[in-house]
Structure formats: structure tokens, C-alpha cells
Image: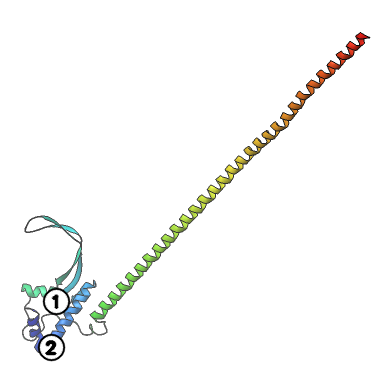
Amino acid sequence: MNKAQLVEAIADKLGGRQQAADAVDAVLDAVVRAVVAGDRVSVTGFGSFEKVDRPARYARNPQTGERVRVKKTSVPRFRAGQGFKDLVSGSKKLPKGDEVAVKKAPKGSLSGGTSTRSTVKKAAAKKATAAKKATAAKKATAKKTTAKKTTAAVKKTTAAKKTTAKKATATAKKAAPAKKATTVKKATAKKTAPAKKAVAKKAPAKKVTARKTTAKKTTARKK
């Protein structure tokens, strides 16, 4: 039985083929959307539809026998209910006439509840808001980390500049006394040099006086 045959089978109960087609489309759309969103669609007596995550694994190509890596994926899964299983196995007989094979829901269980479509929309909206919040938080943390890194780099550069300036001042201070000592040495050397020259000039004066005394002695002898 395909979809068209299914519509024809329920057309008499729903008042026409178009109404039956709309009902089938609505049911299938609601089931698919709920399973894609990660919800479990359970129909009592019929079964349940759910989403199953399969991790990455290795498989073999049935034609070549080659080992192939299969990526991580998600697949839909249908689990038949106990009533469905009993009817298929033959432990229970199908009802005759217009009776429904699937067990009906108890009275009052369908009233006051939200529809599957609204539930799916709410779940999708929640996931979208959570994703937006996560991306915003990631961007904020990234901005904070970059700001911290820039401030740390600026602090390091300023500290390096301060240390270099301190070293330069220390070397300048060390070099200044050395220059002063050399200038003092040069000044003392200049002062001592004229003193030596003056002493050397006084010595010849003594010799002149000695010559004068000898001259006096000769004049005395002549008399």
C-alpha cells in the first residue's frame, strides 16, 4: 500500500478523498517534524517514532569487501507497540467491520493538551535561542581573552621600557664619576707642571751669586 492507496482506504471515513489526503499529510508532517527535533512520537497500540544517533564506525562494502569508515549520523527508528505486534503475530485477531484495529485513546486524554505541531515549534524555538545564547557567550569570551592579551602585552612593553631606561641612567651615572676623575687628574697635572718649571728656573740664579762672590775675592787679592 502506497500513500494514494492509504488515502483511498480512509476517504470514506473522513468524508472525501481530499479530506483524507489532507489528514494523512498533516499526520506524517507532524511525525517527521517531531522526530527531526529530537522528540519521541508515541501512539498507544501502534508504536513510537524516535531519533537515534549513530557514532562513527567502520563498515565493509558488501560488493568489494573493503573496509569503509562511516561518519556519525542520526536515523529515524520505529518501534512497534505491543498491540501491533500481537496482531501481526496472530496472537490477537483483527476486529471485523468498522472497528479500529489500533486501541483508541481513553476519553479526556486528548483534551486540554497542546498539539504536536506547537510542541515541535516550541522545541525548535528553544533550541534556536540556546544556540544564539551560546554563540553570544563565545563571542564575549573571545573578546575578553583578546583584551586581556593586549593589556598584558602593553604592560610587558612598558615594563621593558622602564627597565631599559633605568639601565641607561645607571650606566650614565657610572660614566659621570669616571669623566670627573679624568678631568681632575688633568687639572692636577697642569698645576704640577708649572711648579717644576719654576724650580728649574731658580737654580741658575744661585750660580750667578756664586760668580759674584768669586769676583769680590779677586778684587780683594789685587788690593
Question: Quick one: quadrant of the C terminus?
Answer: top right
Nearer to us in this view, 199 or 77: 199
- At a point 16% along the width and 79% down the height, the residue shown is 28
Q: CA distance from mark 2 to mark 1?
A: 25 Å
Question: Which quadrant of the view contains residue 189?
Answer: top right
Q: Which residue is mark 2?
A: 18
**183 in relation to 161, above or below:** above
Residue 136 percent coordinates (x, y): 37, 68
Q: Is residue 159 visible?
A: yes
Question: How many numbered discs, if any?
Answer: 2
- At a point 15% along the width and 74% down the height, the residue shown is 47
**56 in relation to 205, above or below:** below
Kind of residue indicated by mark 2: Gln
Q: Nearer the viewer, mark 2 or mark 1?
A: 2
- At a point 55% along the width and 48% down the height, the residue shown is 165
Residue 67 percent coordinates (x, y): 12, 55
Q: How is the image coloured?
A: rainbow
- At a point 61% along the width and 43% down the height, the residue shown is 173
Residue 57 percent coordinates (x, y): 17, 58
Q: Which residue is mark 1?
A: 46
